[in-house]
Image (cartoon, grey):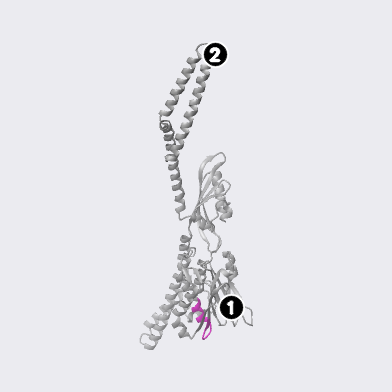
Amino acid sequence: MNTKLSSQIAKMVGAIRAHDLLWAAGFAALIGAGLIVAGFADWRVVLGAWLALGGALFIRNQVSPLRAYAEPIIDIVDKQLAVRRSGLADLRIARDVPEALPDPLFILDTDGIVEYANPAAKELVGSDNIEGRHFAAALRATDVFEAAEAVIKTQEPQTVDFVTTGSVERSCRALVAPLGAKSGEGLTRALIFVHDLTSERRVERMRADFIASASHELRTPIASLLGFIETMRGHAKDDPAAREKFLGIMQSQAERMQRLVSDLMSLSRIELNEHVPPKGNVDLADLAGDVIDSLAPLLERAGAIVDFLNETDLPTKIRGDRDELFQAAQNLLDNAVKYGGDPAMIKVRVGRGSAPALGGDGEPAHRAGDAAAQTAARLNVPVDDLVYIQIRDFGPGIERADLPRLTERFYRVDLEQSRKSGGTGLGLAIVKHIANRHQGGFQIESRSGGGTAFSCHFLAADRSAPR
């Protein structure tokens, strides 16, 4: 026990002893007065006896140490404090365990109010202010809340599968279990433990999609290869010119299959991690310059002219995965080279706010995807807090009916042209999923005869979306 508390106990014991001394002296005086009045003793004898008793008590009070009186109290207090300290240590451990859990955990009272939410739960909901709010308002998962109500009434645990809403859906499974002592009205609390099944679900879907896509898209080039092999083994076996021609076609088909498998693997990998926010910082202006430099040989062969401009003096950094963003910009620039005319004229723009809209006379431009205002509203920030990268070509444009389908897997506006240019029909789907993972927006704007603009909007790294 600390010295201050021991001193306080000793002082308290001293006060009690002084109080007892006064009471003893008072009772002794009262008894002596009674003896005098009754005639049983002389007042001198009574006074002498009273003084002797008072002196003895006073000397005893002064001579005996206060510690002797305080020690039993101090021992009791020490034991109680030890119990309290042990209990507090247990509470801290019990609190630290859910805090360290990677999976969300909620504790609700009988009214459905969140009493506790660990950091993973706050990240799932997207808010730091969950405790004290109703669970139905914190997490929009009706099935989970209904299960919590049922558990409080029936005292039987339940398991519920649900999907979260937001820019990226997450498949989850909630274990709802009773928690706390029983009372006349049921259980005092319900525990909700959420396990994220998104990765497992994505792996299952990825495997199914990969098999379906590969079997569909690889069927034609494989059949072509088999046909040419059969021809070369037959009447073209001794024809060097035909053999050389067929070998060139076979190489082209093999390279197409290689690109297709590479894009399928890339898309599957991006979809698998789409629900995981990236951690790094990427400067879009620097990235755009690096992408243009990396495609310099392609641009030179195609005779394409690229005009790059950073349209802001403000920072253009965003939170993101550099490799994925590089791939998205590379896909868009490669797409502009293929379909932007002969030779292609391309503008690459990076800036803050909303990307420039297609202007000029003629038919109005048509749009598909998320505009800057829609992206900012979803993130609950002003449009000026966004950073954009836009890649625009001046080709023939895209028909309005085709715009919404451009980001679908294997969708091509001109199938023959796509195959001639080596396209797989997956480039824009990859860009869309990369934008989704970065909580950004991807918009396609096109005008007949006026070209097409592909714009990606992201939250600036020097801003943070309100929770």
Q: Which residues are magenta?
A: 332-346
User: Does 155 sit left or right of 250 as displayed?
Assistant: right
Q: What is the distance, in whole Å, between disc 2 and disc 1 at their CAs? A: 122 Å
Say what secondary structure mark 1 lies in.
strand
Say what secondary structure mark 2 lies in.
helix
In terms of image quadrants, where is residue 376? bottom right
Q: Which mark is residue 37?
A: 2
User: How many numbered marks have been drawn onto this rendered protein structure?
Assistant: 2
Q: Nearer the viewer, residue 291 or 367?
A: 291
Q: Looking at this rendering, what residue extends furthest in the front direction?
A: 44
In reply to whether residue 343 is colored magenta, the answer given is yes
Q: Looking at this rendering, what residue extends furthest in the top direction?
A: 39
Q: Is residue 171 visible?
A: yes
Residue type at mark 1: give it. Ser
Q: Residues within 10 Å of mark 1 (few under 14, many from 20)?
A: many
Q: Which residue is mark 1?
A: 446
Of badges 2 and 1, the one in the foreground is 2
Q: Which quadrant is home to the N terminus?
A: top left
* CB under 8 Å between discs 2 and 1: no
Q: Residue visible at 51% across and 20% down? A: 29
Q: Residue visible at 57% across and 68% down? A: 375
Q: Which quadrant is home to the C terminus?
A: bottom right
In terms of image quadrants, where is residue 301? bottom left
Q: Residue visible at 57% across and 40% down? A: 185
Using the image, determine if residue 172 lies above or below residue 347: above
Q: Nearer the viewer, residue 318 or 431?
A: 318
